[in-house]
Image (cartoon, rainbow, N blue to C red):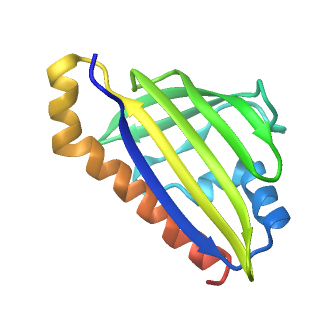
């Protein structure tokens, strides 16, 4: 088994820590931060209070292919950190850590995603050809939306 891929992103926004964490605690806001080309849809019935043990079901379209994805919140420590893992979906392994730290005049948000693809060499080829670039595009979009939403 190969080592997991790691994607790390960091952004500083002008919102205070508590308000920033509250924004990310509202699952509805995930739709605002996801690129339209993914056609992201939350399937889990609402309301969805986030806490350790919460399960979320999404549907996306990746290059036209419909995918269902279930994640679970494994760590919930407001207002500083939460983690989600894939329970069922397209990855062999997906572990996403969201960190929030108060900084002078705002909040630093750090995302660390550790992931692996299935299918051995086919998964490695898909990663090299599209998956890594697509994940970077998704997080680039997310950063630009956060900057727009928080007025940075």
Residue 100 location, x and y as percent?
A: 70, 58
State the image quarter where residue 104 is shown. Answer: bottom right
> Which image quarter: residue 82?
top right
Q: Quadrant of residue 29?
A: bottom right
Indicate whether 41 appears above or below 4: below
Look at 15% across and 22% down and name the residue there. Answer: 121
Q: Is residue 103 above or below residue 8?
A: below
**Which one is in front, 40 or 76?**
76
Between 38 and 52, the residue placed more toward the observer is 52
Compared with 152, 69 (above or below) is above
In this picture, residue 93 sits left or right of residue 26: left
Question: How far from the left and from the top, in percent, is residue 10?
Answer: 52, 63
**How many labels were placed on the picture?**
0
Q: Residue at 20% across / 18% down in the picture?
A: 120
**Figure check: 51 above or below 138:** above
Q: Nearer the viewer, residue 14 or 104?
A: 104
Taking the spot 57% from the left edge, 59% from the top edge, the residue there is 33
Residue 108: tell me if it is visible: yes
Would residue 15 appear left or right of 49 to someone viewing this image? Answer: left
Q: Is residue 54 left or right of residue 90?
A: right
What percent of the width, then of the height, locates residue 144? Answer: 50, 72
Quadrant housing the N terminus? top left
**Which residue does the image show at 73% across and 76% down from the upper left?**
106
């Amino acid at each position: 088994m190969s080592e997991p891929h790691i994607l790390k992103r960091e952004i500083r926004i002008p919102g205070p820590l508590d308000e920033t964490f509250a924004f990310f605690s509202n699952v509805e806001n995930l739709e605002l931060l996801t690129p339209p080309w993914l056609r992201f849809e939350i399937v889990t019935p609402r309301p969805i209070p986030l806490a350790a043990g919460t399960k979320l079901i999404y549907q996306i379209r990746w290059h036209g292919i419909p995918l269902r994805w279930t994640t679970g919140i494994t760590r919930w420590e407001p207002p500083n950190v939460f983690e989600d893992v894939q329970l069922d979906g397209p990855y062999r392994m997906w572990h996403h850590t969201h960190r929030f730290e108060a900084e002078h005049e705002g909040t630093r948000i750090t995302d660390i995603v550790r992931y692996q693809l299935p299918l051995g060499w086919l998964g490695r080829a898909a990663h090299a050809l599209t998956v890594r670039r697509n994940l970077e595009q998704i997080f680039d979009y997310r950063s630009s939306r956060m900057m727009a939403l928080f007025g940075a």
